[in-house]
Image (cartoon, grey):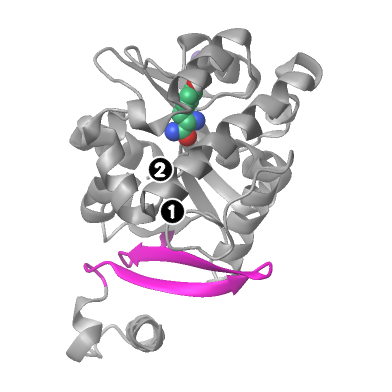
């Protein structure tokens, strides 16, 4: 943390001086030299919890990466932290409370858990002194991004979302029940999360997540945040993998229809994790849209 602040201070000094007089060059030295391209890790107090985040790049344009269920910056966004332009963007990947290294507390799922995540995410970026941010939200992180954009419109610049759903149907419930028992997950999907959480916390939290998301079936139209979509004001790109087995196409179409001016881009070979499997293509689409 201390190192992070020191680096930021020196970056600010370099910016300030070069703005005042482009002739003055403040050399990068020591740990500060690596700040722009390396990924730093820190925790900061927000809304009564210590939120963990990773940070990289030194561009003017602040971008927050929002992971999916049980996700974290390190498990969900390796290729984005590594390869999104460090010149254009300052990229932050956060671990929502109860996920990744933002523990304690243990994760819980009150009916407003997505609203809570949206407020935490926005307040994290305000605490880090970003004046406005763009959002890249995957799956549950896409839901959080939509809610943040709807509720805090003046703070959100642009948004890219993929694998998100804004309501829960019987079809979705069947899929949720299919992933409740993590011992049935493929080794490849299970391994990184098991390493991060240990088997017991991972299994217990997945089970709690399924109960948590099923709560929405009792709300009008199974609504998670569909009622908020007309409030979104920022330019929005929706990506959808046509081979996504977890989130059917109709969810992307619904968001596209109800977010004014949004763009829908289909990736024919993409599955749910299209930003990992087709990282270069994803990063280029995101960069072109954000710039
Ligand atoms: N929303 C989950 C995530 O954040 C993925 C998921 C979507 C799982 C739909 C099941 O029916 C489902 N990764
Ligand atoms: Mn359109």
* Crowd class of label 1 (few under 14; some 14 to 19; many from 20; radius 10 Å): many
Residue 161 location (% of width, % of height): 47, 33
Residue 251 location (% of width, % of height): 54, 16
Q: For mark 2, give the secondary structure.
A: helix
Magenta-colored segment: predominant secondary structure: strand
Q: For mark 1, give the secondary structure.
A: strand
Residue 104 location (% of width, % of height): 55, 66
The residue tagged 1 is 63
Q: Nearer the viewer, residue 200 or 267?
A: 200
Task: Tell me the quarter of the picture where residue 59 sits.
Answer: bottom left
Residue 159 is marked as none
Q: Which residues are magenta?
A: 36-65
Magenta stretch holds residue 236: no
> Which quarter shows the C terminus?
top left
* Total numbered labels: 2
Labels 1 and 2: the sequence-earlier one? 1
Q: Work out whether 93 lies above or below 246.
A: below
Q: Nearer the viewer, mark 1 or mark 2?
A: 1
Residue 290 is marked as 2
């Amino acid at each position: 943390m201390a190192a992070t602040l020191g680096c930021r201070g020196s970056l600010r000094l370099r910016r300030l001086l070069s703005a005042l007089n482009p002739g003055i060059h403040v050399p990068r030295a020591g740990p500060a030299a690596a700040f722009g391209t390396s990924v730093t890790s820190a925790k900061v107090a927000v809304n009564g919890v210590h939120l963990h985040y990773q940070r990289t790049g030194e561009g003017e344009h602040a971008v927050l990466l929002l992971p999916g269920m049980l996700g974290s910056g390190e498990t969900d966004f390796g290729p984005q932290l590594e390869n999104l332009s460090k010149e254009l963007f300052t990229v932050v990947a956060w671990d929502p409370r109860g996920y990744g290294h933002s523990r304690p507390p243990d994760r819980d799922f009150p009916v407003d858990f997505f609203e809570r995540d949206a407020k935490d995410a926005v307040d994290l970026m305000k605490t880090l002194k970003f004046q406005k941010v763009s959002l890249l939200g995957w799956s549950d992180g896409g839901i959080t991004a939509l809610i943040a954009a709807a509720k805090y419109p003046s703070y959100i610049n642009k948004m890219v979302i993929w694998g998100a759903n804004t309501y829960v149907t019987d079809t979705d419930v069947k899929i949720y029940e299919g992933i409740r028992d993590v011992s049935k997950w493929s080794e490849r999907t299970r391994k990184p999360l098991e390493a991060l959480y240990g088997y017991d916390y991972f299994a217990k939290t997945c089970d709690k997540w399924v109960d948590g998301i099923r709560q929405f079936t009792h709300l009008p139209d199974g609504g998670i945040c569909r009622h908020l979509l007309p409030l979104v004001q920022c330019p929005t790109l929706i990506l959808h993998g046509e081979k996504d087995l977890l989130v059917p196409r109709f969810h992307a179409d619904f968001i596209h229809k109800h977010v004014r001016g949004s763009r829908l881009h289909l990736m024919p070979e993409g599955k749910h994790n299209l930003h990992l499997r087709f990282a270069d293509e994803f990063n280029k689409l995101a960069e072109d849209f954000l710039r």
